[in-house]
Structure formats: structure tokens, C-alpha cells
Amino acid sequence: MRFGMGYGAWTDGPFGGGGRHGRPGRGEHEGGRGRRRVFDGGELKLVLLKLIADAPRHGYDLIREIEGLSGGSYAPSPGVVYPTLTLLDEMGLIEEHRSEGTKKRFATTEAGRGHLAEAAAQVDELFARLRKLADHRERTDGAPIRRAMGNLRQVLQHRLMRDDVSEDTLHEVAALIDEAARKIERMK
């Protein structure tokens, strides 16, 4: 069995940039910070092998599982996952597992379980990296800030669109926004 080749496996946060299906905020870098892979090919191979050892899975299930483990900040592309599954199969580390439906699920072989046992320390480090991504995402989630900025925008539009807004009111509003900006800038 052969799957198409592709690029991918990028993320935000402390490990690089890029994302699944080009969705902004799910891995696409903003601000030109550059890109790095979260896992090299050998590392992704171990992550996929471990997840398959935990339970037989198909490609998209593996992508969703990794995305969940990383707190939504990283999802490898199908163009990286499927060729890696092909490689694992050709190496005899996984095999197609009987399943209902059209999706091919894979299970680990005895050789695959042995390979995981030999690389147990590295596998632990790789899953710690996914947890670190999730922790980083949780700490830096800007949802409350985005909500507050949207609130401010809505109030400003509502208040300032009225015909009776004086120039003094405009200066007062500008001063309040400038004051908030200065306070945020001084925060540690």
C-alpha cells in the first residue's frame, strides 16, 4: 500500500510553525517567526507507533489524537502521516488490522512493540513535548483578551457613531485607551 507524499507537520508555540489544512491560529505562523518541524521523521514514526500500540487506529484518528494531546496546537498533515504509516508497515512494525468501513486501521506487530520498548525513553520525551505544547497553548490562549477587545470595539462603535459625540468625548475616550495601553505595557 502506498500513500501520497507531502509536506507538513508544523506548529505554533515554542516548537515552530504551520498547521493542518492551512487554518490560521492552528499552526500557521503570523508575524514571520520562521518554521520548524515539531517532530522529525523518526520522531513522528515513534509517536504514531506508540499511539497505534495503545489502540488500533487509522490515519485521521492518529491526526486527531495528536492534535488533542497537543491541546489543539499541532496536527500533522495527512501528507506526512500516511507516508509514515507506509514506512512503518514496510518495516514490519505495524500491519493492517481488520476493521469495518473503508478506513484502514493499523495495529502494532511484535517487532513494533519491541521497537517501542527499545525506544521507551525517547517516546516518553516525545509525548512530554506534546504535553508542553498543550501547556503552552493553555497559558497563551488569548480568548479572554479577544473577547475584551471585541467588547471594546463594539462599545466604541456604538458610542462614537452617534451624532451628538463631542470632540471632548473623543479626546476622553482616546485618553482612556492610551492609559490602558500604558498600564498593560508596564505589566510584568
Image (tube, rainbow, N blue to C red):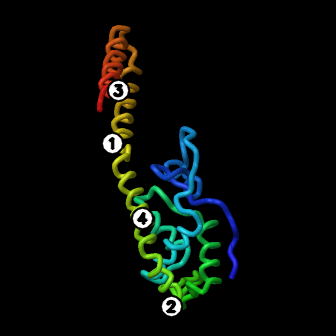
Label placed on residue 110 = 2
Front residue of 83/46: it is 46
| 46 w.r.t. 179: above or below | below
Percent position of residue 188, x then y:
29, 32
Residue at image location 48% in from the left, 86% down from the top: 114
Label placed on residue 39 = none
Residue at image location 34% in from the left, 21% down from the top: 177
Asked which secondary structure carries label 1, the reply is: helix
Q: Which residue is mark 3?
A: 185
Asked which secondary structure carries label 3, the reply is: helix
Q: Which residue is mark 4?
A: 68
| 14 w.r.t. 100: above or below | above
Name the N-terminal-most of marks 3 and 4.
Answer: 4
Amino acid type assigned to the residue bearing label 4 in the image: Gly
Confirm or deny contact between disc 1 and disc 4 (CB under 8 A).
no
Percent position of residue 127, x then y:
42, 67
